[in-house]
Amino acid sequence: AYALSEPRSYAIVVTPRTSTMNCESSRVRRASESAAARSAGSCLSRPGYSVRTIQAQEPDGTTTCSAPSKSLTVRADETHALPAVEYKGVTPYQPIDRNWVTFQVSRSSDSTYAPLETNREMLTDGHRYTIVVMRENDASGLKTRIVRDDLANDATKAQVRVINAAEGFDKIDMRRRGVNDDDLFSGVNVGSEAGFKAIDPWAGTLEFRAED
């Protein structure tokens, strides 16, 4: 069951259960933020923007990995590192004051930092962004998807986004059970997202289905 019952923004990241190759609610990460917090953070006090990380890459050997190997750290450079985050975790937003950025992902946050994935992006002042770390479609390594958190200025609505990080599922649909003719999101490709959708606050069961 999911409670989208407040005027917040909700980022829902769908990842696979690798042992059974299906999408279950335990594999969905919800990152929410209140309308008041969105409003307070919409304008930065100095040039720059804010970035956060959602870790959607399930570690190999989950039952035997040591704790440090399960977490990933994203950084723009040695002085701009986001907090380490474990699988299904999300970091707070962190300010960054440069526009051309080479984001790197590593399992270590110290002097032994060795990038596993690199993504160079041009980001715009005054906005917020989310970096989603996920597996490549063929599960051979990591990739990152950076999305801008553009939200409507309607403090009465819940705003929902779904990101398909489930390799092995080319497209997914998301709907609210019991709501007639309801397709919140349809045909979201793996590695993609469909932007925020504003809905009336709601609580119930969300269904995720893989398209044939």
Image (cartoon, rainbow, N blue to C red):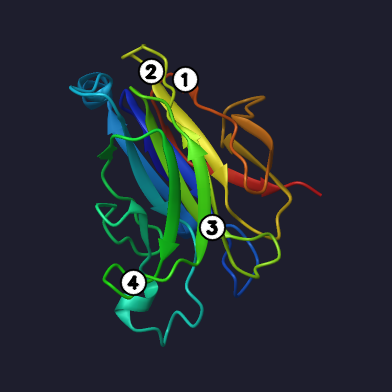
Gap in Å between the C-alphas at discs 1 and 3?
26 Å
Gap in Å between the C-alphas at discs 2 and 4?
39 Å
Number of marks present in the image shown: 4
Q: Earlier in the sequence, mark 1 or mark 4?
A: 4
Specify the amino acid type for callout 4: Ser
Q: Which quadrant of the view contains residue 186?
A: top right
User: Which residue in the rendered view is the most extreme toward the right?
Assistant: 212
Q: Earlier in the sequence, mark 2 or mark 4?
A: 4
Q: Earlier in the sequence, mark 3 or mark 2?
A: 3
Specify the amino acid type for callout 3: Met
- Left or right: where does residue 146 sit relative to residue 38? right
Q: How crowded is mark 4: few (under 14 residues within 10 Å), some or many (20 or more)?
A: some
Gap in Å between the C-alphas at discs 1 and 2?
6 Å
Which residue is denoted by mark 2 in the rendering? 157
Residue at left offset 45%, top offset 66%? 115
Gap in Å between the C-alphas at discs 4 and 3?
17 Å
Where residue 197 appears, x then y in whole percent? 51, 23
Which residue is denoted by mark 4 in the rendering? 108
Viewer-side label of 2, 4: 4
